[in-house]
Image (cartoon, rainbow, N blue to C red):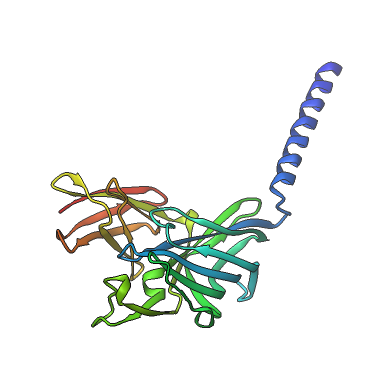
């Protein structure tokens, strides 16, 4: 019996050391959880923008008591071009008190555009300021765990080109005379949402750069298809959606009753 108790004690000690080391590696204090701040974007419906940069100075989250908690403060620059179809970039990972956070305040300090011909426009004065965004669904931070809050910047709505054309459309690089900036974000708890994945084809052949959109919580989000015709929407709350695609050359079509269940992935194919 003595040897048995010694073995059990040794096992308990080893397990205890393992748990302790694991917690130290995560570096999450008691009563807190980690929050990973992620960025993604809705792209431009054209391909002559090589960079769309935003400078993040501070990110704050509002807790149940109505207080804002800082999860990032510093200077972080991000080229939003390419952060599409499920691709994200991390701003920071920070420990905060466990609980529910329903609103964010994002402070920017810079914005700039670079075009394919090398032309650059800076809108730093436009960008400086704070933007309050509802987190929908609200961010749930669990003790000892890591949660992800997603900020989806619609760069097509945020960067507004000025030029010689009629209406709100930039058709060529030569027609662009300037650019203004006013950030348009949506935010969600990435761990409480699902995805929509699909493919756009023309008579069965994959179509690149098709403009695909879906309405989430009353707001249209969009993307463009990859070379293989694929697209992905992330941060999509559970529900039923209509996915639409449109191109100038091939017209438009849509798929109804696309079902996102919990954190699962819904799939669909749109053929033009």
Q: Quadrant of residue 257?
A: bottom left
Q: Quadrant of residue 252?
A: bottom left
Q: Quadrant of the C terminus?
A: bottom left
Relative to 218, 5 lies left or right: right
Position of residue 81 relative to residue 160, above or below, is: above
Q: Quadrant of residue 239?
A: bottom left
Relative to 86, 125 lies left or right: right
- Can residue 53 be seen at all in this image of the molecule? yes
- Coordinates of residue 41 in the picture (x, y in percent): 42, 63
Task: Identify the residue at horizontal 51%, vertical 69% (top origin).
Answer: 54
Which of these two is toward me, 16 or 164? 164
Relative to 153, 215 lies left or right: left
Task: Identify the residue at horizontal 75%, vertical 40% (top origin).
Answer: 21
Position of residue 10 relative to residue 190, above or below, is: above
- Coordinates of residue 206 in the picture (x, y in percent): 22, 46
Which of these two is toward me, 75 or 34? 75
- Can residue 62 be seen at all in this image of the molecule? no
Which of these two is toward me, 39 or 242? 39
- Coordinates of residue 30 in the picture (x, y in percent): 73, 54
């Amino acid at each position: 019996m003595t040897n048995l108790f010694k073995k059990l004690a040794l096992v308990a000690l080893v397990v205890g050391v393992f748990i302790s080391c694991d917690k130290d590696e995560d570096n999450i204090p008691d009563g807190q959880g980690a929050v990973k701040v992620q960025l993604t974007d809705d792209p431009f419906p054209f391909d002559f923008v090589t960079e769309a940069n935003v400078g993040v100075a501070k990110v704050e989250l509002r807790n149940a008591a109505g207080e804002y908690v800082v999860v990032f403060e510093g200077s972080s620059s991000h080229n939003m071009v390419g952060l599409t179809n499920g691709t994200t970039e991390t701003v920071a990972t920070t420990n905060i008190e466990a609980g529910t956070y329903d609103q964010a305040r994002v402070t920017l300090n810079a914005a700039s555009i670079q075009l394919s011909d090398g032309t650059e426009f800076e809108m730093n004065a436009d960008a400086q300021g704070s933007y309050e965004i509802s987190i929908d669904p609200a961010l749930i931070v669990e003790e000892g765990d890591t949660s992800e809050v997603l900020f989806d910047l619609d760069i097509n709505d945020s960067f507004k080109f000025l030029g010689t054309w009629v209406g709100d459309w930039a058709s060529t690089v030569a027609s662009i005379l300037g650019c203004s900036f006013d950030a348009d974000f949506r935010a969600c708890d990435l761990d409480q949402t699902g995805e929509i994945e699909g493919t756009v084809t023309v008579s069965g052949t994959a179509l690149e750069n098709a403009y695909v959109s879906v309405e989430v919580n009353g707001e249209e989000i969009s993307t463009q298809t990859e070379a293989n015709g694929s697209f992905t929407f992330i941060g999509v709350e559970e529900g039923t959606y209509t996915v639409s695609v449109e191109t100038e050359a091939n017209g438009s079509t849509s798929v109804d009753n696309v079902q996102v269940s919990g954190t699962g992935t819904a799939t669909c194919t749109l053929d033009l």
